[in-house]
Amino acid sequence: MHSINDDDIRDRAYALWVEQGSPEGREQEFWYQAERELSEEGGLDTSEEAAEVTQPTPPAGTLAR
């Protein structure tokens, strides 16, 4: 599975920004749109459930800290 990085997002956001006529003050909008599009293309699960972080259960006989 391909993970997206900031450079990929930046390139896509810039392309979206240029396509829209280079409007000022909408940087976050284009960043989030680019991030969402790249995630969908890569098949990444961006749901809230997938974003939850859980700690793994330690193996039996080990001390949890």
Image (spheres, helix red, strand yellow):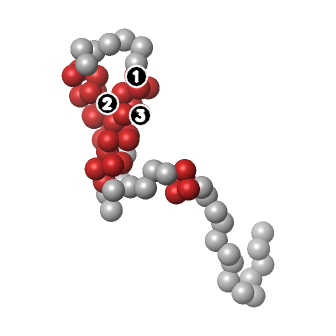
Q: CA distance from mark 3 to mark 1?
A: 9 Å
Disc 2: CA contacts within 10 A as few (<14), some (14-19) or many (>=20): many
Q: Is residue 56 above or below residue 37?
A: below
Disc 3: CA contacts within 10 A as few (<14), some (14-19) or many (>=20): few
**In the figure, residue 59 lies in which quadrant?**
bottom right
**In the figure, residue 43 lies in which quadrant?**
bottom left
**In the figure, residue 64 lies in which quadrant?**
bottom right
Seen from this angle, which residue lies furthest bottom? 61
Q: Earlier in the sequence, mark 3 or mark 1?
A: 1
Residue under the point 21% across and 22% down: 19
Q: Which residue is mark 3?
A: 32
Q: CA distance from mark 2 to mark 1?
A: 8 Å
Q: Is residue 50 above or below residue 20?
A: below
- Answer yes or no: do the residues labelled 3 and 2 have beta carbons within 8 Å? no
SS under mark 3: helix
Residue under the point 31% across and 54% down: 42
Q: Which residue is mark 1?
A: 27
Q: Amino acid at mark 3?
A: Tyr
- Answer yes or no: do the residues labelled 2 and 1 have beta carbons within 8 Å? yes
Q: Which residue is mark 2?
A: 13
Q: Which mark is residue 11?
A: none
Q: Position of residue 46 (x, y in %)?
A: 45, 50
Q: Amino acid at mark 2?
A: Ala
For the N terminus, the quadrant is bottom left
Q: Amino acid at mark 1?
A: Glu
Q: Earlier in the sequence, mark 2 or mark 1?
A: 2
Say how many tags the image has: 3
Disc 1: CA contacts within 10 A as few (<14), some (14-19) or many (>=20): some
